[in-house]
Amino acid sequence: MTNDRPLLARLNWYWLFQLAGWLFLPLLLIAMTPGDSHTPRMLGISFWGVVAGLIISDTWHRLLKRQIRNGVRVGWKAIMVAILVLGVIHTAVQTVGYMVIKPFGEVHGVYWVPGALMFWWGVYLVWNTFYMAVLSLRRANRFEQEALRLEISAKDAELRALQAQVNPHFFFNSMNSVRALIYEDQNAAAQMIDQLASVMRYALQSGQNDTVPLAAEIEAVQAYLAIEKIRFEERMRVSVEIGLGLDQVRIPPMALQTLVENAVKYGVETSPTGSEIRIRAQRMDDGKIHIEIANLGAILPFANSTKVGLVNTRKRLALALGSNASLDLTENSGWVRATLTLPEAA
């Protein structure tokens, strides 16, 4: 099975930094000393320190990981005690190396011990500081990812809840239409049920997605309008105009249907002469997409269901497409217009 992770994610950064850090010490020593002192014994004691450092620091690293995994909080007091112990251990190991390799001959006296301790304490202070800093960054990154995951889950749950509020509202109204028609014209009622089944199938399928193509939403809207056309006949007149290349613009499922339903309810149903419903989608000069649903009529001040539908649609737009998407309801010259403004990438 191939590994799809990026190369940088597959690298073992701990050992890369371990090797780079410990190999830096002998290289620094070589750079700071005259060339005639670079004897095999001198190089040997340098790399003795590298191997000892790798073993000692990795052992400490494993102990730290075990403590953290067990839920034990490792504070800076414990780290400072560990630095003292690690420095003493490394000084002792390095002393054995001097006795074995003898880069400067036999080891005499203890005058060099304080300097050696200070050096190795400094090395392990740097090692632990870097390690704890990296650990803190990784922990902060993990918390940020978890917070982002929870935020996405919360938004997804809210979006599903809003969709659940919209769909039953539509089906309840549609079933009332079927019930009213079944006693008047059974053939028309049968056609209405077929169209309703088409809309239900779309709603069930699209409900699993945050957004759907505009073409699919328009198809469902036209099925809904076909249902209402049977009921209202000549009282309802519909025109649909979708700009070139806008079929795949993404919108929340059933969002357009909700606005069209409001246009039918408050434009056609409340008027003795009916109303024309215009659906138009176009790309504006600023690159944004405008989808307008217009009907003859007026904004009713006490139309609570309209307000609920608009509030839900606005929330779903924000959750699915972000703050660049908006919905405005305006009234001008006897026309009520609901205008969806979508970002170009929608």
Image: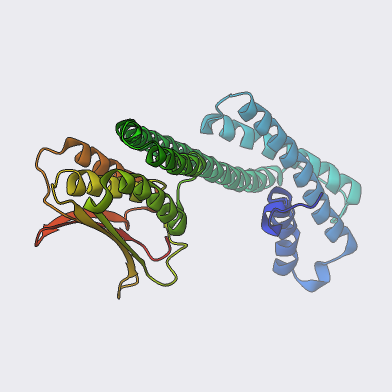
Identify the residue at image location x=79%, y=72%.
35
- Residue 292, position in %: x, y? 27, 60
- Between 63 and 100, the one lying in front of the other is 63
- Between 338 and 235, the one lying in front of the other is 235
- Residue 233, position in %: x, y? 27, 49
* Colour setting: rainbow
Q: How many marks?
A: 0
Q: In the figure, 142 relative to 4: above or below?
A: above
- Residue 303, position in %: x, y? 15, 39
- Residue 286, position in %: x, y? 30, 73
Residue 318 in view: no
Q: In the figure, 159 relative to 256: above or below?
A: above
Q: Give the quarter of the image for residue 343.
A: bottom left
Identify the residue at image location x=11%, y=37%.
302
Name the outermost residue toward the bottom.
285
Residue 174 in view: yes
Q: In the figure, 143 relative to 216: above or below?
A: above
- Assign the C terminus to one quadrant of the image: bottom left
Identify the residue at image location x=30%, y=76%.
285
- Between 186 and 215, the one lying in front of the other is 186
Q: Give the quarter of the image for residue 85.
A: top right
Query: 99 left or right of 156?
Result: right
Query: 97 left or right of 172?
Result: right
